[in-house]
Image: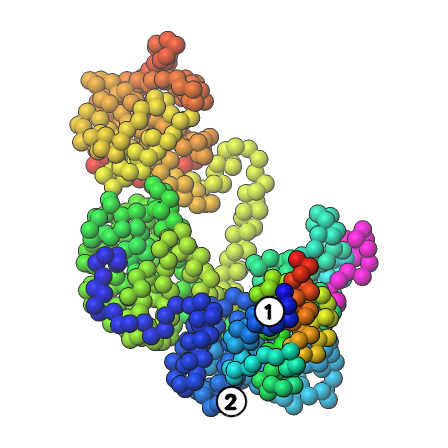
Amino acid sequence: MTQSEVIAQLQPIFDDLFMERVVLTPELSAHDVEEWNSLLQISIVLAVEQHFKIRFRVGEAESTNNVGEFADLIARRVAEK
Amino acid sequence: MSRDTLESSTSPPPASGPAISAARGVAELKELASAKDRRFFSALRDQTVAAQTLVDVLMLASLRKRVAQRGLSPEQQAIRVAVLGGYTLYPLNELIGHFLAAAWYPTSYSAEFLVGDYDNYISEIIDESSRLSEFRPEVIVIVPSHRRCAYSGYLFDPREKQEGEARATAAHILELCQTAHKRTGAEIVLFNFPLPGRSDPGPYRTRTLGSDWNFRKLTNLELGLNAPSYVHICDAEFLSARRGTRNAWDARAWFESKQPYGPELTLDVAREAAHLIVSLRQSPKKVAVLDLDNTLWGGVVGDDGLDGIEIGDTSPRGEAFKAFQQYLLSLTGRGILLAVCSKNDYEKAVEPFEKHPEMVLRMKDIVSFKANWQPKSENIRQIAADLNLGLDSFVFIDDNPAEIEIVRQFLPEVETVLLSEDPSEYAGMLQDARFFEPKSLTAEDRERVGQYKQEAERRELLSHVTDMGSYLESLAMEAAIREFRTVDAPRISQLINKSNQFNLTTRRRTEAQVQAVIADGECFGFTVRLADRFGDHGLISVVIGRVQGQEVEIDTWLMSCRVLKRQVEEEVLNELVRLAVARNCTRIKGVYLPTAKNGMVKGHYPALGFTATVATDDRLEFELDVPAYAAKPTTIKIAERSYDSI
């Protein structure tokens, strides 16, 4: 799965979680979106794990700096399955 | 009330439907929020109550907060809550806050939180200069660290040492609660410890208090049994077991952010803590108002008649209704009142309570009985007036969604439980609805505890008896012997057709053939029901006698094997002789017809004093001389005899 394919699947998950429409790009990070607080961060990780049926290893989800890195991580975990 | 006879035109459209799928739910909520539609809050409540995953609740919580920022909030009561513990207490506090705000709408609580620092709860409570007193909490939630609830020694240490440490652990936690309570006057919601879900150290865990499994269990027991009334246990042990202990602990979440539990248990404990906090403010429920048809029994008594309704051990469905009635009856032991509200003719509706042998609930158990054709909301209002109780102490229970909706519309203070299509679920649904949970001991309860102690001492004596006679005496058996009655025909026929072992002749009979016996002037038939101090065994024996001149031939004699050796056989013979005498007979003839399964009763008649007269391979016959018979003494108290008019 490519980064952009993952981001395409992330978009509806974010649409569900955020009130405002957030258009995902690889460069986007939590700092760019006012609504993206720690509560939403927890929800995003849980919802992504549920959707892609993967489980991140300890510490790795929080070490990604933007949507692109997050999508790459998801792609790696999906590829391992 | 059955669905068939329901007047659906009187039912308004539901204002807030049942839970809908999460995705559709969120879309609907967002729409309502954008339109600033106040129905947002009832939809939010329904989805919050139904939510099963942490993601769903976090999503709903975020949505609610965004909506509040835009100026859409329900009317709220403020409440101050401190959350302290051995963990990162965020987002636990957010979740508790969400349930308080959303799950009891139209009542909604706006919680202001003091969130304790990670693992700093002990000093936050003990240190008088901490911010706790200043915060003036109404409730303090304490989540003690599991790291302080583990045995410090070895698995194989002496039990006394391990036990002492578990008791000391619990005592220390309860001391903290006491200090927190004294400093602030707050009620304490205390989390106990979830059970560990990993296999080590194997089944040996059960044999030592040194294992986390047993150490936590004993600590939890000590906490619960010794908690003073201002401590309300949030039972993480129960919740972890109910969900599955395997995911109760989430090592990754612990290492990443010092979370206390996995996502599911986090959700469950937050919901539970909110429930405990809300129960501090809400008055308890006192009355269960019950529908009748398809709620207390299967079928419609007005259409199917007394003999046609399903209740009791004749069928699985009947058993399920009976079990539901037993659960309802058990609620009366907690001080809950039962009332009836049914669309029925009064005479028809009371008949099962007065006459049906399998009913558990009787008229004496019902404090108010409304069976008429008025709207149920009106009847419930009347019941409340009769009992002089507020409508907010009522719970209405019905299988008919239209009736539930009418009550929700017209009496919003009354809580409702809509029963499912399957009566086997009824008791469980009511148990999980959580309306009738006991909270703390009343003076009356304490008095009852005293009575229990006396009773326990008596039983202690009884438990030492070793000879059979004293054992039977201790059972306090009571039997009702009754002639065949039309209403019992299904149960009689059922027992006749399923009894194989204790069955002298194995003659099968349909319900219609049982009715024929009732109508036959040459025959008599009686049943025995037996109860002892452990409960009711129901209908356990069936006997049919045929009168031929001076002789009674025992056509059928069968009994349920679970009451073997209880002297029921002797009492049956006493009754047979009594009926023989009443019919001027001098002999009783017993017949044994061997089958593959009834070998256990081959010696039945000789054991009772009959003399053998005929013996062939396929038939044994015996005879008893009636005038010479002396009634056999037993320990069974006979409450009722058959053909009493004789």
Give the amino acid type for the residue marked by disc 2 in the picture.
Answer: Gln
Task: Give the labeled residue for mark 2.
Answer: B69
Left or right: where does residue B549 sit relative to residue B68? left
Q: Residue at x 30, y 50 (%)?
A: B298
Q: Position of residue B150 (x, y in %)?
A: 75, 62
**Quadrant housing the N terminus of chain A:** bottom right
Same chain check for tags 2 and 1: no
Question: Between B622 and A64, which is closer to the camera in this rendering?
Answer: A64
Dominant SS in magenta: loop
Query: Within the magenta stretch, is there residue B150?
Result: yes
Name above or below for residue B142 compared with residue B170.
below
Q: Position of residue B243 (x, y in %)?
A: 57, 59
| Number of dots carrying numbers | 2
Q: Residue at x 31, y 27 (%)?
A: B508
Quarter of image, res B540: top left
Give the amino acid type for the residue marked by disc 1 in the picture.
Answer: Glu
Tag nearer the camera, 2 or 1: 1
